[in-house]
Amino acid sequence: AGAWGSGKTSLIHAAVQGTFPSACEPTLPLQRIPADKLPDNVAAVLVDTAWSLSQEGRQKCISSCLAAHAVVLTYAVDSPQSLLDLKTGLLPALRAAKVAAPVVLVGCKQDTIQPPPEGDEEPKEVKPGMAPVSLERDVVPLMKEFREIETWLECSAKSLAQVQEVVYYAQKAVLHPTLPLFDTHSQQLRPKCVAALRRIFRLSDKDNDGVLNDQELNDFQVACFQTPLQPEELAGVRTMVASKLASGVDNNGNLTLTGFLFLHAMFIERGRMETTWAVLRQFGYGNDLHLRADLLPYFLNGHADQ
């Protein structure tokens, strides 16, 4: 979704067809990308909708977003006004309508922004309103104001730069969401995520000594990812954690709970949410960070106060 002229329809065409359209319709019918064309082997259905000036058009746009698993909002990188339109129009409307889907913010028409000539370090004077959208000046404050925005990237349908990444990050926001795990404002793991990871740590601590030794860490790795860590990889994990957080390992180099939580926070901060989700799902957690019902037969059959 996005304002007219932001590049959303060309982006959809480029993602599905792999080419830049010579002529583009205002909006496209439903477009599908088969599972075998995408990294997570999950098919995607792309719905083209625009934020309209008419009440009917706006309602149609909101209805499409309410039905979506993820919402990609587009603006043109050469048009600060198009980003402002999202800030004052579509984003508040999505919030008011309680759209729960994660939002991916995408700057289109990246090819229209020319890098400064080599050796030209002095910024050119630009007329008011003519400067391209700036990450620090425009995008970061917007993402702080609207926490429902999971991630941001720029692309070019014309050059096909990062077009497939847009679809990938939209799917990633659904399959491996950040919001249940991590508070981007405080830059900390959320309490329910901490509770789940603490339980996983204790289950993995077979000898109940409060730390994970090399064997326990390797057993955990195999259980979650089906691949053992080599001795040098184990040493690398310990060294990295110790260099960042002294309390992350004990005097014998074993991984502490603090270090275990630190590792997952680092994965998420680096955009590797799928790693933490793989661990959580292996140990029976759903997207709401509750244990699956089939793992709790006793409690399901218990009394109301249990």
Image (cartoon, grey):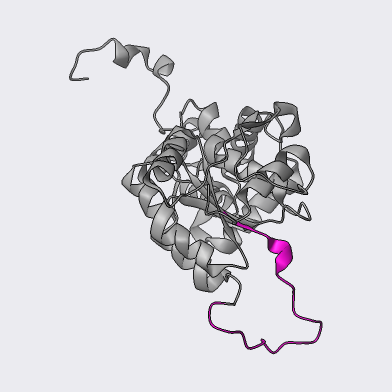
Q: Is residue 182 above or below residue 137?
A: above
The residue depicted at 46 percent of the width and 58 percent of the height is: 86
Residue 255 screen position, x and y as percent = 55, 47
Residue 209 screen position, x and y as percent = 47, 39
Between 194 and 4, which is closer to the camera in this rendering?
4
The single residue placed furthest to the top in the displayed view is 301
- Is residue 234 visible in the rendered image? The answer is no
The residue depicted at 52 percent of the width and 29 percent of the height is: 281
Does residue 177 belong to the magenta stretch?
A: no
The residue depicted at 65 percent of the width and 35 percent of the height is: 218
Name the quadrant of the C terminus.
Answer: top left
The magenta span reads 106-129
Between 174 and 23, which is closer to the camera in this rendering?
23
Dominant secondary structure of the magenta stretch? loop
- Is residue 44 visible in the rendered image? The answer is yes
Q: Is residue 223 above or below residue 138?
A: above
Position of 155 compared to 174: left or right? right
Residue 65 screen position, x and y as percent = 46, 39
Does residue 121 belong to the magenta stretch?
A: yes
Tell me where residue 7 sits by quadrant: bottom right
Residue 73 screen position, x and y as percent = 53, 50
The single residue placed furthest to the right in the displayed view is 118
Between 59 and 116, which is closer to the camera in this rendering?
59
Q: Is residue 59 above or below residue 296?
A: below
Between 189 and 206, which is closer to the camera in this rendering?
189
The residue depicted at 67 percent of the width and 87 percent of the height is: 124
Marker count (numbered): 0
